[in-house]
C-alpha cells in the first residue's frame, strides 16, 4: 500500500484525484473551503447559563459529545463546557463577535479559523475505511447522526462528528492534515477513493 | 484496556496519560511535620493487589482528569468519574 503515496511529499496535502481501483468511489472526501471557527469555553460555573443564553439566541448547545446547529452555526461538543463552533460565509472576527454578543461574559471565545482542515467524508464504504484508524464505535446504533468525538486517528488528534446518515465531518489540525490525509488515502483506496478540495497538494 | 470517560464514552487507554495513585493529598506546608509529610506524599506508595483509585488524564479526548477504580490484578475497571467535583472538574 505504501507505494501509493511514494510520489507524494509527506509535508503536502494529498492532491485531489481518484485513488485505488477505477470505477465508482466507495469513499469520497472533500476538503471544505475553510469555514470560520472558534472555541467556545464556558467560564467557571457558567456552563448552564451559557447553554441557556445560546439557546435563546438560536443555537441549542448540547452539554455532551454531540453536534448541534442553529443561527447559521454548527457547534460540536469537545469537553464539558467546551465547543468548537463553525460558521460558513463569515470571517473569524465576525464569528467571535457574534458568539460574544450571544453570551456576554459567560465564555472565553478564541478564533480558530485556519487552525483546522475541515474534511467531509462520505460514501457507502466510509465507515469501513474509517474503522481502520478510528477507535470509536461507528456503528449507527452507537454513533448516530449528531454524535461527535474527540480522539486520535493514526496518532493524529481529531474532532469529528456525524453530520447526517451519510457524512462524517473531521476537523484536523492544519499542520497534521498531510499525515491524516495519507492515512485516509491508504485506508480508503481499496474501495476506490475520490478526494477533492486539496488542489495539487 | 478501555476506559469509559464520563464525557467521551469508552476509549482506548492509549488516549490517556497515567499519573498513579489517587489517594495522596498535598500536605499542609506550614505544619510542623511538613518535611516528613511531604516525603511521604512524594515517595511513599501502597502497592495493592486489588481495587485501586488512580488518576488518569484524558489527553487525547476531553482533557479532563479522571479518577479510575481499577483492579490491579485483572485490569477490570469498576468506576470512572471526573477527578474534581461539580464544575471544578471543568
Image: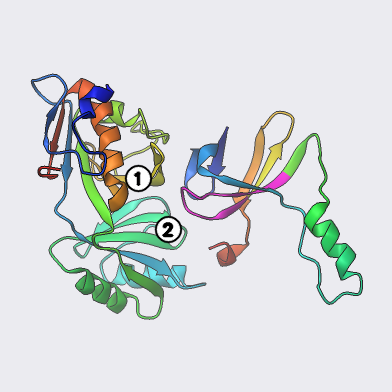
Q: Which residues are magenta?
A: B53-66
Q: Chain of mark 2?
A: A
Please give the name of the residue rendered at 22% of the width and 28% of the height, measured from the top-left corner.
A6
Compared with residue B55, is residue A139 higher up or lower down, i.e. above or below? Answer: above
Which residue is painted at 33% across and 39% down in the image? Answer: A144
Residue A140 position, x and y percent, is: 33, 33
- Residue A63 is labelled as 2
Give how far across and how far down residue B46 sits, in percent: 83, 45
Q: Is residue A201 left or right of residue B14?
A: left
Asked whether residue A160 appears in the rendered view, the answer is yes
Q: Residue A181 in magenta? A: no
Number of marks present in the image shown: 2
Residue at left 43%, top 53%? A64
Distance from the alpha carbon under mark 1 to that under mark 2: 12 Å
| Pointer 2 local density, CA inside 10 Å: few below 14, some 14–19, many at least 20 | some
Of A173 and A76, the residue lying toward us: A173
Image quadrant in which you'd find residue A95: bottom left
Which residue bears the numbered disc 1? A147
Q: Looking at the image, which residue sits at the far right?
A: B32
Query: Residue B62 location in percent, x, y?
Result: 47, 53
Q: Would residue A173 be seen by someone viewing this image from the given angle?
A: no
Residue A123 higher or lower than A150, as above or below: above
Amino acid at each position: 500500500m505504501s507505494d501509493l503515496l511514494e510520489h507524494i511529499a509527506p509535508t503536502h496535502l494529498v492532491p485531489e484525484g481518484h485513488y485505488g481501483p477505477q470505477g465508482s468511489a466507495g469513499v469520497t472526501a472533500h476538503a471544505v473551503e475553510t469555514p470560520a471557527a472558534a472555541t467556545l469555553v464556558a467560564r467557571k460555573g457558567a456552563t448552564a447559563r451559557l447553554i441557556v443564553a445560546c439557546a435563546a439566541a438560536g443555537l441549542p448547545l448540547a452539554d455532551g459529545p454531540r453536534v448541534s446547529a442553529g443561527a447559521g452555526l454548527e457547534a460540536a461538543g469537545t469537553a464539558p463546557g467546551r465547543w468548537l463552533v463553525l460558521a460558513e460565509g463569515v470571517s473569524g472576527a465576525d464569528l467571535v463577535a457574534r458568539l460574544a454578543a450571544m453570551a456576554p461574559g459567560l465564555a472565553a471565545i478564541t478564533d480558530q479559523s485556519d487552525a483546522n482542515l475541515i474534511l467531509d467524508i462520505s460514501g457507502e464504504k466510509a465507515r469501513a475505511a474509517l474503522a481502520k484508524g478510528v477507535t470509536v464505535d461507528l456503528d449507527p446504533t452507537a454513533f448516530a447522526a449528531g454524535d461527535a468525538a474527540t480522539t486520535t486517528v493514526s496518532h493524529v488528534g481529531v474532532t469529528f462528528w456525524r453530520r447526517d446518515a451519510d457524512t462524517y465531518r473531521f476537523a484536523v489540525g492544519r499542520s497534521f492534515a498531510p499525515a491524516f490525509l495519507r492515512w485516509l488515502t491508504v485506508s480508503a483506496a481499496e474501495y476506490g477513493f475520490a478526494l477533492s478540495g486539496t488542489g495539487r497538494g | 484496556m478501555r476506559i469509559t470517560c464520563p464525557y467521551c464514552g469508552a476509549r482506548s487507554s492509549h488516549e490517556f496519560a497515567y499519573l498513579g495513585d489517587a489517594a495522596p493529598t498535598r500536605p499542609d506546608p506550614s505544619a510542623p511535620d511538613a518535611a516528613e509529610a511531604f516525603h511521604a506524599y512524594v515517595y511513599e506508595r501502597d502497592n495493592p493487589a486489588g481495587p485501586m483509585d488512580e488518576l488518569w488524564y484524558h489527553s487525547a479526548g476531553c482533557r479532563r482528569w479522571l479518577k479510575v477504580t481499577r483492579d490491579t490484578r485483572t485490569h477490570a475497571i469498576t468506576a470512572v468519574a471526573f477527578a474534581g467535583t461539580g464544575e471544578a472538574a471543568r
